[in-house]
């Protein structure tokens, strides 16, 4: 059983997303082990990219700041390696295809595995165009995780159900990342529709920003993914506010 599968088998998973190098490399190294201690089960490490099509303003800002901090895929690998020495929490790189392609598919997968990374999410790579990366990821022992959106066809749901490894990333909205006041009314129907196709864990992201939303999603899914709200709480605020928010999310999931 992979480290990702083991984490998802234990309880409703709290998955955090942070952009590597935002607001600083030191903060990334400090906060991620702390997140695991506060109740996060998996961590997505965002590799900053100059053309982040799936990201809303909060994560775009974080990515731009990280790029100005000279964060590169090579530095992200180094940060992951340092994190692996501090924590056993599963680490997942979330990125776009261009940085992976530029690095070299096989070289990137091998370097990620050597750094202690457990999985990859390449948000702009559809499964129809990913056989080569799938092969490289499998050879390196990495889970390649695909996304589904409310606009996904039945054929795409079938394909992702067959090809995703670790879990399926359910995008809650037909839009970009970002904290939202409410989630779509038909989210339960969408998750149920995917559930009929697969036994893989289903984790929902994009838009979750309150414990109440986390509890609603946890009733139908195996995990929640929170990014933009965490980044907002890193933006010049006391660390205690971030800790309190994560603990509230953990308690909401544990109450389901």
Image: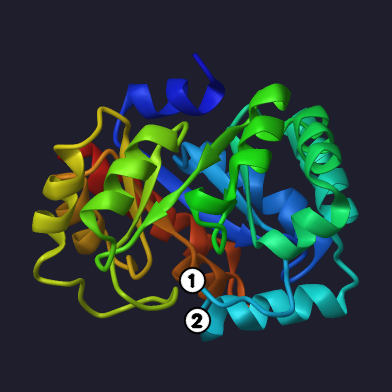
Tag shown at residue 56? 2
Check contact, mark 1 vs mark 2: CB within 8 A. yes
Residue 45 appears in the figure:
yes
Point out the tag, 1 or 2, that comes first from the N-terminus: 2
Element marked by disc 2: loop
Q: Residue furthest top?
A: 1
| Relative side of 73 to 4, left or right | right
Residue 34 rendering spot, x and y as whole percentages = 61, 45
Q: Say how the picture is coloured.
A: rainbow
Question: Residue at the spot x=76%, y=54% of the render?
Answer: 100
Quadrant of the image for the C terminus?
Answer: top left
Element marked by disc 1: helix
Is 151 in front, or is 170? 151
Residue 164 rendering spot, x and y as whole percentages = 44, 37
Mark 1 highlights which residue? 228
Residue 47 appears in the figure:
no
The answer for how far apart the CA atoms under marks 1 and 2 are is 8 Å
Question: Residue at the spot x=81%, y=43% of the render?
Answer: 108
Q: Residues within 10 Å of mark 2 (few under 14, many from 20)?
A: some
Vertical arrangement, residue 115 with respect to residue 173, above or below: above
Residue 144 rendering spot, x and y as whole percentages = 56, 39
Q: Quadrant of residue 136?
A: top right
Vertical arrangement, residue 81 with respect to residue 207, above or below: above
Vertical arrangement, residue 4 with respect to residue 21, above or below: above
Is 16 in front, or is 60? 60
Vertical arrangement, residue 82 with respect to residue 192, above or below: above
| Relative side of 147 to 191, left or right | right
Residue 78 rendering spot, x and y as whole percentages = 88, 45
Question: Residue at the spot x=20%, y=45% of the render?
Answer: 194
């Amino acid at each position: 059983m992979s480290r990702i599968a083991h984490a998802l088998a234990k309880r409703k998973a709290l998955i955090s997303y942070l952009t590597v190098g935002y607001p600083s490399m030191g903060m990334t190294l400090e906060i991620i082990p702390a997140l695991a201690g506060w109740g996060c089960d998996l961590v997505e490490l965002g590799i900053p990219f100059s053309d982040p099509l799936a990201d809303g303003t909060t994560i775009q800002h974080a990515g731009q700041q990280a790029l100005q901090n000279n964060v590169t895929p090579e530095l992200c690998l180094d940060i992951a390696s340092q994190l692996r020495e501090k924590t056993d929490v599963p680490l997942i790189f979330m990125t776009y295809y261009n940085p992976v392609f530029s690095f070299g598919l096989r070289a990137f997968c091998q370097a990620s595995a050597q750094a202690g990374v457990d999985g990859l999410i390449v948000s702009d790579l559809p499964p129809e165009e990913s056989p080569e990366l799938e092969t490289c990821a499998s050879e390196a022992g990495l889970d390649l995780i695909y996304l589904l959106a409310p606009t996904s066809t039945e054929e795409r749901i079938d394909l992702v159900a067959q090809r995703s490894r670790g879990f399926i990333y359910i995008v809650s909205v037909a839009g970009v990342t970002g904290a939202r006041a409410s989630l779509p009314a038909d989210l339960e129907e969408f998750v149920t529709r995917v559930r009929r196709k697969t036994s893989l864990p289903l984790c929902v992201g994009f838009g979750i920003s309150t414990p109440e939303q986390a509890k609603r999603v946890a009733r139908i899914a195996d995990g929640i993914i929170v990014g933009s709200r965490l980044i907002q709480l890193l933006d010049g605020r006391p660390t205690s506010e971030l800790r309190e928010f994560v603990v509230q999310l953990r308690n909401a999931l544990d109450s389901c």
